[in-house]
Image: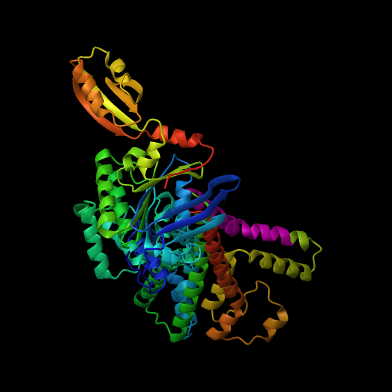
Amino acid sequence: MSASPELSGSGWPIVARKEFADHVRSTRFLVLFGLVALAGLAAVHAATGTIRDAAQQTSGGPSVFLFLFTLSKNRLPSFHEFLGFLGPLLGIAFGFDAINSERSSRTLSRLVAQPVHRDEIVNGKFAAGMGAIGLAVGCVVCLVSGYGIVRLGLVPTAGDVARIVAYVVVLVAYIALWYGVALLASILARRAATAALAALALWLVLTLFGGVISGAIADAVHPVGSAATSADVLANARLDQRIHRISPDELYQEATQVLLDPEARSTDVVTSPSRLDQAIPGELGLRESVSLASWQILVLLGGVAALFAADYLIFMGQEVRA
Amino acid sequence: MTVSSATPAIETRGLVKHYGSVVAVDHLDLRIAPGEVFGLLGPNGAGKTTTILMLLGLTEPTAGTVRVCGLDPRHQALDVKRLVGYLPDDVGFYDDLTAIENLTYTARLNRLDRATADRRIAELLGEVDLTDAGDRRVGTFSRGMRQRLGLADALVKDPAVLVLDEPTVNIDPEGVRELLTLVRSLSIERGMTILLSSHLLHQVEQVCDRIGIFVAGRLRACGPIAKLAAGVEAVWTIEVGIEGDEGLGGLALQSIDGVTRVERTAGRWIVAADRDVRGEIAGVVVQRGWTVTHLQRLGADLDAIYHRYFEEATDVRVA
């Protein structure tokens, strides 16, 4: 009988390496990368004039470079708005068939019969998906930055670069959240199409109708009629925003606004006048901006962790046989 | 780690598995010695795959214990999976990867170093006759090729125990013959313990040292095939082709002592007997001045064996 050598190292990097290679070689990756790159460049290109004007007005300001990501022209969304929209699609597109394709191609029983823990399979797939998405997003951000440097002659300061890095972290966490949702759908639904539809439906509900639903609830609790006082309007708007924060999209937008705009002082739609009065005009440091958005960032990261835990708890409990 | 020969390669005691109210496996006691080739035989849905999944620690038993090379698959899952090569029924591969890439992934998951993996994969592809297809995408493979690749995949980790779930399904008779020859040589040359499940007794009987008849979650009989067959009425099924008998061959065959049943299908006689009566058949035919055009044993009559053990209320055990 043969002797078994000691198993060295954990299994998830092996799974991740194979999955990552599959991702970057896939047509899916090329198509999505092309889409995001095109959207990013289109947004920046369209906003060129606006960015030039803004740069002249605030000439010398350290945050001019960030206009690349935040300014938009007319109805075309800005770069960060575009990614707020495309990010979930990226996450869902990479994750919706992660587990159920292994079932339908009958590779799952062979895979789980190898000496790896089941959570390592989920971990490896998660890491690979995030790696591929991070690669795509990182490349596009570099592409847009390059465009700004070459075409607009803007030069980023160290502070700008730090803010962009912080923004990319939030963006990746935001996409990871949707990747986690898609992974969960791929574990629960036997068919990839069902999983994709379920994840997309959740995204649409939260993104498109999130605002409508939170608005309706806020109106019911704090009605804003013709006789409404400013306190009522304020209460209504606050409740609206609080409920709306269930949507990852809202969290991403709020965090991004603060991180990419050193002059932003609050993530709330409504800031009490007393606080604004006290505010001294000027720019915040990255540390202050991060602490302003810390709540949003923590909820995003917590959501990723919770989904991730749910993913493998459910996967561990499942029968291998369909 | 070494496993002493006193430790059974596979041992289950009082193994039970319920799926809701369905009893898939009912108090299974099984002991397979190292180096043995054991055939788990039973109709579809008898609980064979469930048993195999419990051996690998892929499904939790409801009750009872499992030991594979002395290890408990529930608590030492990784060690067991390192020792056991598994070919699932209807095996699947990553269709976009080549045969070599698929096997390399398995080798990596088993923590084989690059050089060992490359060498072993090349050897195994040779053994299953897929050397020329190594760099082809598995998506282009036929079912028979997939099955052979599946066997190579199960062997990549150089297992002590090989578990094959319905390995002969979906492949042509020639493929079955080659596969079984390979199984036999693995047992003889490498001393590998092999557990194979099948619902086709006549396909696997030649390679198995012992078989277990598994019906509705229970092991009805267990032992070498000859001894199991001894307890059964009709164990020999012989196909006979006779020329010049003008339809009278059936009566003549029926008169032979030991023949229990004679049927005519597709121009040939199918004779069921409780012993080897091929000599008498030839004698009878020649005596009447007819010609034997065909005389072949089809194997033990599985239906008869199943039927026999199905009917039994109590388990039959042959040492």
Tell me the residue at 72%/82% (across/down): A274
How many numbered marks appear?
0
Q: Quadrant of the N terminus of chain B?
A: bottom left
Report if residue A223 is visible in the image: no
- Asked whether B214 or A136 is in front, the reply is B214
Q: Left of A108 or right of it: where is B99?
A: left
Query: Which percent across, then down, holds residue A246?
Result: 63, 64
Q: Is residue A153 above or below residue B258?
A: below
* Residue A195 is inside the magenta segment: yes
Q: Left of B120 or right of it: where is B215?
A: right
Tell me the residue at 53%/62% (across/down): A311
Report if residue A296 is visible in the image: yes
Query: Which percent across, then down, holds residue B21?
Result: 61, 45
Helix, strand or loop for the magenta stretch, by majority? helix
Query: Which percent across, then down, holds residue B213?
Result: 44, 42
* Image quadrant assignment for residue B79: bottom left
Query: Which percent across, then down, holds residue A97?
Result: 45, 55
Q: Left of A52 or right of it: where is A310?
A: right
Tell me the residue at 46%/80% (across/down): A64
* Residue B287 is inside the magenta segment: no
- Asked whether B88 or A39 is in front, the reply is B88
Q: Which residues are magenta?
A: A192-218
- Asked whether B178 or A280 is in front, the reply is B178
